[in-house]
């Protein structure tokens, strides 16, 4: 079951969902018309740094583990200019990260939440993919969310830190899962290093 914006607010108030900093306003007003909560999602913003994987001579070997450290060592890291931004060129993989940290705690006796991270339609219409094939945020997750971004369109798209880049869709989990933290749990950088 997908949570509505009202249910998302309740989950935050109950500690079943933590987003830091918490998106505001919860409801659009005349003073603050730009509300990050849609009917069934909450917008997240792009963090200040991107990582661009270098071109070989290496090969990714995921059977060896340690992909976060490997990427950290084999990427160019770039701080985004808040004014001019960064012109993301077509067909170039770029790792970004949400400005917000998200936590989906597994609490005793409380139905946990899982989530999916999805792109925004305005970017999708320009050819920007936000997450490739890894949209799932598992129950128990804690940390910023890495965005595997690539443009399949014909032109560059300017990205800036703090811009609404994706949306989080929250779902109820049936049963209490056994915690199983991933190698990226608690990540603080786009490649996934804590």
Image (cartoon, helix red, strand yellow):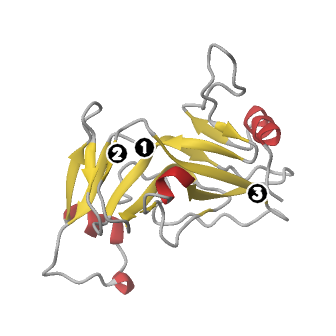
Label whose residue precedes the other's in the sequence (1 or 2): 1
Crowd rating for badge 3 (residues with CA inside 10 Å; few <14, some 14–19, many 20+): some
Q: Which residue is farthest top?
A: 31
Choose between 182 and 45: the one closer to the eye.
45
Residue position marked by numbered label 2 in the rendering? 159
Task: State the SS at label 1.
Answer: loop
Crowd rating for badge 1 (residues with CA inside 10 Å; few <14, some 14–19, many 20+): many
Crowd rating for badge 2 (residues with CA inside 10 Å; few <14, some 14–19, many 20+): some
On the image, which quarter does residue 53 sit in?
Answer: bottom left
Q: Position of residue 97 (x, y in %)?
A: 41, 50
Compared with 55, 190 (above or below) is: above
Q: Position of residue 65 (x, y in %)?
A: 37, 77
- Rounded to the nearest angstrom, the CA distance separating label 2 from label 3 is 28 Å
Q: Is residue 101 left or right of residue 46?
A: right
On the image, which quarter does residue 137 sit in?
Answer: bottom right
Label whose residue precedes the other's in the sequence (2 or 3): 2
Q: Which one is closest to the eye, mark 2 or mark 3? A: 2
- Rounded to the nearest angstrom, the CA distance separating label 3 from label 1 is 22 Å
- Asked if labels 3 and 2 touch by Cβ distance under 8 angstroms, the answer is no
Q: Is residue 178 left or right of residue 126?
A: right
- Rounded to the nearest angstrom, the CA distance separating label 1 from label 2 is 8 Å
Q: Is residue 7 left or right of residue 90?
A: right
Name the residue at 81% across, 51% down.
108
Name the residue at 60% across, 28% down.
34
Compared with 41, 30 (above or below) is: above
Q: In the rendered image, which quarter contains the N terminus?
A: bottom right
Residue 46, label in figure: 1
Q: Which residue is farthest left?
A: 57
Residue 171, label in figure: 3
Q: Position of residue 20 (x, y in %)?
A: 55, 35
């Amino acid at each position: 079951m997908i949570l509505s914006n009202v249910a998302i607010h309740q989950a935050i108030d109950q500690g079943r969902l933590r987003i830091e900093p918490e998106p505001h306003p919860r409801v659009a007003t005349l003073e603050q018309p730009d509300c990050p909560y849609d009917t069934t999602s909450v917008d997240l913003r792009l963090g200040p740094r991107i990582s661009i994987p270098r071109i070989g001579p290496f090969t990714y070997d995921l059977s060896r583990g340690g992909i976060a450290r490997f990427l950290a060592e084999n990427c160019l890291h770039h701080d985004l200019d808040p004014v001019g931004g960064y012109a993301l060129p077509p067909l170039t993989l770029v790792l970004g990260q949400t400005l917000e940290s998200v936590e989906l705690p597994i609490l005793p006796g409380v139905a946990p939440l899982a989530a999916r991270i999805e792109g925004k339609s305005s970017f999708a219409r320009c050819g920007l993919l936000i997450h490739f094939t890894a949209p799932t945020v598992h129950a128990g997750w804690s940390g910023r969310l890495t965005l595997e971004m690539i443009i399949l369109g014909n032109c560059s798209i300017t990205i800036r830190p703090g811009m609404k880049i994706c949306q989080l869709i929250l779902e109820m989990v049936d049963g209490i899962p056994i915690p199983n933290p991933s190698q990226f749990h608690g990540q603080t950088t786009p490649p996934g290093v804590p």
